[in-house]
Amino acid sequence: MADGSFSITTPIFYVNDVPHIGHAYTEVAADMMARWHRQRGDDTWLLTGTDEHGQKILRTASANDVSPQEWADRLVRDAWKPLLETVDIANDDFIRTTDERHVAGVTAFLQKLYDDGYIYAGEFEGYYCVGCEEYKQPSDLVAGTGPYEGQQVCAIHSIPVEVLSERNYFFRMSDFEQRLLDLYESRPDFIQPESVRNEIVQFVKQGLRDLSISRSSFDWGIQIPWDPKHVLYVWFDALLNYITALGYGTADDEAFRRLWPSVHIVGKDIARFHAVIWPAMLMAAGIDVPERVFGHGWLLVGGEKMSKSKLTGIAPSEITDTFGSDAFRYYFLRAITFGQDGNFSWEDISARYQAELANGFGNLASRVIAMIGRYFNGVVPERVALEPADSAIDALAVSVTERADAAVRAFAPHDAIATIWELVDALNGYITDQEPWALAKQEGQRDRLATVLTTALRGLGTVNVLLSPVMPKATAKLWAAIGDGGGVHEQRIDQAPSWSGAAQVVPLDGGLFPRIEQVEAAEQQVHA
């Protein structure tokens, strides 16, 4: 990426089923960081999309009596694109591996590797997991239980693997073993977090085999340009979306030259593909490797990884219908340390909604606006003779902005939000200590009342700007009451303490976070 640019991607998701909150979590994390960088003034680009080729999609489509293309079109239209609206994703592009632009870029890339001698024909036999769309090492398999007792099953999907024997084309991935290890050593932050980095380094140190990159037993995929009887291995196809979306392999590659390399936000279970296979592919083609690969943790329900087959998958709308999209975004970004596994529970999101959003941020906004309306008819007064308590709020706003910005740039959105909440809590404490309602009743305290309320409003505005990438709807609503026109998303986030508010505030149209007394009804609906 050029200086002042920020290019970030989510994985492209399989369309074999509908999305659950694990998918939405990845989308929200990438979107929050993209929104933050946009408001820093960076040339920002956020890519997401869908992975539509491979044996898993073919089998799912066949089971539903439709063609693979019809299945993909239906799922993208009815499930995957609506997900972006459900959790307010402001993506710049959406790529599908069935797009003509993608097929053209993949074909150009593949032909280059073949012409340069990095692809050869050979025989291969191995254990294949259709769920992962991957040949498995013996160490990736475990003994089956229950109906699969006595069989070898995939450690991730808990389903039996298949023994496949094919004459395929292979990518000379073993040629890049040392170059990858050198990359990991010279750029320690290339793979994050450290736990994922350590796992991948150890995997590569065990030795890399050449990668089978074609299939001839089915035809749902991109054809190998020099041998149309073969289609491209789905992961080799899918990984290329990150550059085909930018115009790689076409005459219009200005975005590729301007924005590549990108940061990849992925689940830790697919970090190996992104941090081993993908950079090796790029090295072979003479293209820069990604800026960074961040493998975040899993969302757990009842201590188990999200899974439709185990009935632990929760649709994002089941949460947003009760709490709203802002609370969904806030909860998953705040409650889970980015990079670690995190447990979801209805009780926790309900408690945080009440304590942190409704009673914390929401009540702060309502009180400040209401008191300026009551005591100054909505006109924002000038501050007079700052006292140490006022200056402390001003200083904290500056400190919080700097530290939150550093946290986002370090891929720690949870730390950024916790830092912003220092200002939320300080402002609530400041109002409690200064007692503006008492000042309003005292002779000669008009200037002090004005200073307290305007100081609180300035801090509230700073909070609002800083939280706009996290909760776009609530902050836009608050900005309409305290801002000076335009939109909160147009404000420079790195200059949040110097935000320019309106000369007059207007009452909020209802609270920012309507109170939800209990969540039992929502739980009963979900588990009915």
Image (tube, grey):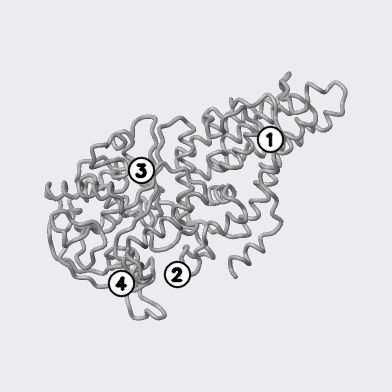
Q: Position of residue 219 (x, y in %)?
A: 23, 64
Query: Judging from the image, what secondary structure is the residue with disc 4 in?
Result: loop
Q: Residues within 10 Å of mark 2 (few under 14, many from 20)?
A: few
Going by the numbered disc 2, the residue's amino acid type is Ser
Q: Which residue is mark 1?
A: 427
Going by the numbered disc 3, the residue's amino acid type is Arg
Q: Which residue is mark 4?
A: 161
Of badges 4 and 2, nearer the viewer stands 2
Q: Is residue 165 left or right of residue 267?
A: left
CB within 8 Å, label 2 to label 3: no
Spatial separation of the CA atoms under disc 3 and disc 4: 32 Å
Q: Residues within 10 Å of mark 1 (few under 14, many from 20)?
A: many
Report the residue at 45% width, 30% height from top.
Answer: 41
**Residue 309 marker:** 2
CB within 8 Å, label 1 to label 2: no
> Which of the two labelled residues, at mark 1 and mark 3, occupies the earlier sequence position?
3
Q: Is residue 285 left or right of residue 313?
A: left
> Which of the two labelled residues, at mark 4 and mark 2, occupies the earlier sequence position?
4
Going by the numbered disc 1, the residue's amino acid type is Leu
> Which of the two labelled residues, at mark 1 and mark 2, occupies the earlier sequence position?
2
Report the residue at 52% width, 29% height from top.
Answer: 492
Q: Which residue is mark 3?
A: 292
Q: Position of residue 3 (x, y in %)?
A: 36, 29
> Which of the two labelled residues, at mark 2 and mark 3, occupies the earlier sequence position?
3
CB within 8 Å, label 4 to label 1: no
Going by the numbered disc 4, the residue's amino acid type is Val
Report the residue at 33% width, 36% height from top.
Answer: 259
